[in-house]
Image (cartoon, rainbow, N blue to C red):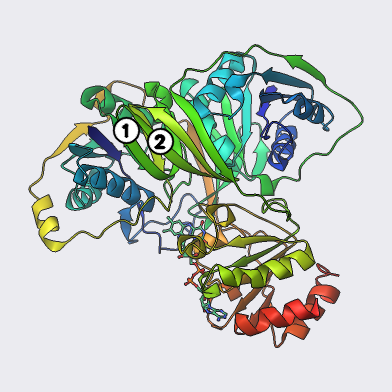
Amino acid sequence: MKILVPIKRVVDYNVKVRPLSDQSNVDLNNVKMSVNPFCEIALEEAVRLKESGAASEVIAVTVGKQDSQEQLRTALALGADRAILVESDNLVEPLVIAKALANICEDENPNLIILGKQAIDGDNNQTGQMLAALMGYAQATNASEINISGDSANVTREIDGGLQTIQVSLPAIVTTDLRLNEPRYASLPNIMKAKKKELNIISLADMGFDISNRTELLSVELPAERAAGVTVESVDELMDKLKNEAKVIS
Amino acid sequence: MKILVIAEHDNNNLKGSTNSTIAAAREIGSDINVLVAGLACSNVANEVASLDGVTTVLLADDAAYENFLAEDIAKLVISIADDFEYILAPATTFGKNFLPRVSALLDSQQISEITAVLGPDTFKRPIYAGSCIATVKTLDDKKIISVRSTAFDGVNSGSAIAEVKDIASVGTDGKSSFVNEELAVSDRPELTAADIVISGGRGMQSGDNFHLLDSIADKLGAAVGASRAAVDAGFVPNDYQVGQTGKIVAPDLYIAVGISGAIQHLAGMKDSKVIVAINKDEDAPIFQVADYGLVADLFEALPELDSKL
Ligand SMILES: Cc1cc2nc3c(=O)[nH]c(=O)nc-3n(C[C@H](O)[C@H](O)[C@H](O)COP(=O)(O)OP(=O)(O)OC[C@H]3O[C@@H](n4cnc5c(N)ncnc54)[C@H](O)[C@@H]3O)c2cc1C
């Protein structure tokens, strides 16, 4: 079984992102970039499937700028066998990313595609489902458990009401939620080995479909600030404030 | 400007996220058609028909839709999509599951989780865990939009009753099937619908200690939530998680207990009207968003609060 793991280069989750002073976009100057946390979980799951013997090859792919090679190298250090960069000059939207990934799927014919449920930059939560639709594949989003048997997989999904288990026939798309696994760290020897692994670069523009963005970013601003609060000294004072000042309890 | 809203429900009851999505639709236009897809869900269709602002209810009552599988709901929406310029769904795990499929099949770039409608093609939405708010304009003819429920006050029933039209099922493509579900059952209000939410974090130390919150929640008629750390540690199930990648809540009162206030947690609750933080660390970032902060050991503060309520 061949597994494709699309990943994304995003701002590290510890960074507090702010708008540029002209509010034209977010300020990404000199901030730490990482592999999107949900993509790390996706990769970890794929690597574990390979280690268990269920999968034979794990391919990491990203659609991004030249600098995304850094995240692909991380993926290789974490256990991907090879990597593909679909290189673009600009950052593109989920629909374009999904179309590029569909192209890669046509070439590679993976049996399973595991990706993060959302990237923590745009928080869109779209790419996996879009790819599934474009390929006509089944999907299981927000996975907290994946069990492969033969040509289908049982996937437990974290939904608002609790947990749901569905069966999808392969090839299928699975998107990961936080509790699917705890990703490993790359060891130094594996980081060294990753430098020698295969990383192919394909041009997005050469894929032959419209790659223009369909939305315009008009501005980026900070959310409304909350008025400064007060410190209360005791439970009694807290209750008094909630009853008589905020009037939220009776 | 015909608008299609996909209703979220459980075949018996309508979910409040639908009312909020209809409210967002009303800010876009007035020809609002609501698709109710499910099995034996005519009650839900009738409930939707009574809501303010609804023009027509489209009812697809078929076994294919019983469990709302993304492939099948998307296929159904596509079968009627020609008639509509806007397709809206709630940004819940229900809407997030199928709407991007619809969007890709219609070759349109979905706008996720809008929090404001500024014009027919211009919307606000949070990005980077709500650290920033983006104003975006879509250039697509067909506009596919998911709606953050907490940002729009849900519509109530009005005086008029909309017509309910049956529409044909387009069946299932059989690529995925439902196995089972473990849904949380609770006598308390649902987390996203509650007026008061009390949430516990890693500071609670164990699942057993959540009874300290349960008892207060019962007295206040509150829902109980949690941080990711508390869910990851197995103190409480996943459906308790509030945050960037969990549930978004905006109750009248949010009480955060033993929660540090990571940006990913704040993303899910900082639009609450009144925020209370109880934490033993006076430097915890949660105090920066709290209206009332109590620096205290929760194992002392909670029993005292409980006894005085
Ligand atoms: C991709 C990604 C997505 C995420 N999504 C979410 C999300 O949706 N929701 C979410 O919540 N988090 C999310 N997180 C995790 C987030 O970054 C934090 O790790 C998490 O919110 C911390 O939970 P906590 O505040 O309970 O734990 P901690 O940060 O460990 O804080 C525990 C707090 O309890 C206090 N405390 C301890 N003992 C006591 C006591 N006896 N009395 C009073 N106070 C006490 C401590 O002072 C401390 O402030 C996400 C992270 C990532 C990377």
Q: Chain of mark 2?
A: A
Secondary structure of the residue carrying numbered label 1: strand
Q: Quadrant of the C terminus of chain A?
A: bottom right
Disc with the residue nearer the chain's start (2 vs 1): 1
Picture disc at residue A154? 2
**For the residues marked 2 and 1, what is the alpha-carbon distance in whole angstroms?**
8 Å
Quadrant of the image occupied by residue B116: top right
- Residue at left 66%, top 49%? B185
Picture disc at residue A207? none
- So how many labels did they put on this image? 2
- Specify whether B125 is left or right of B166: left
Q: Residue B198: x percent and y percent?
A: 67, 66
- The vertical placement of A8 against A129, above or below, is below
- Residue at left 81%, top 31%? B47
Q: Amino acid at mark 1?
A: Ser
Q: Is residue B188 visible?
A: yes
Q: Residue B96: x percent and y percent?
A: 54, 37
- The vertical placement of B67 against B250, above or below, is above
Q: Quadrant of the N terminus of chain A?
A: top left
Q: Chain of mark 1?
A: A
Q: Residue B18: x percent and y percent?
A: 70, 36
- Residue that badge 1 annotates: A149
- Specify whether A83 is left or right of B106: left
Disc 2 under 8 Å from ligand 1? The reply is no
Query: Label 2: few (<14), some or many (≥20) within 10 Å?
Result: many
- Residue at left 71%, top 23%? B40
Residues at marks 2 and 1 touching, judged by CB atoms closer than 8 Å: yes
Q: Residue furthest right?
A: B159
Secondary structure of the residue carrying numbered label 2: strand
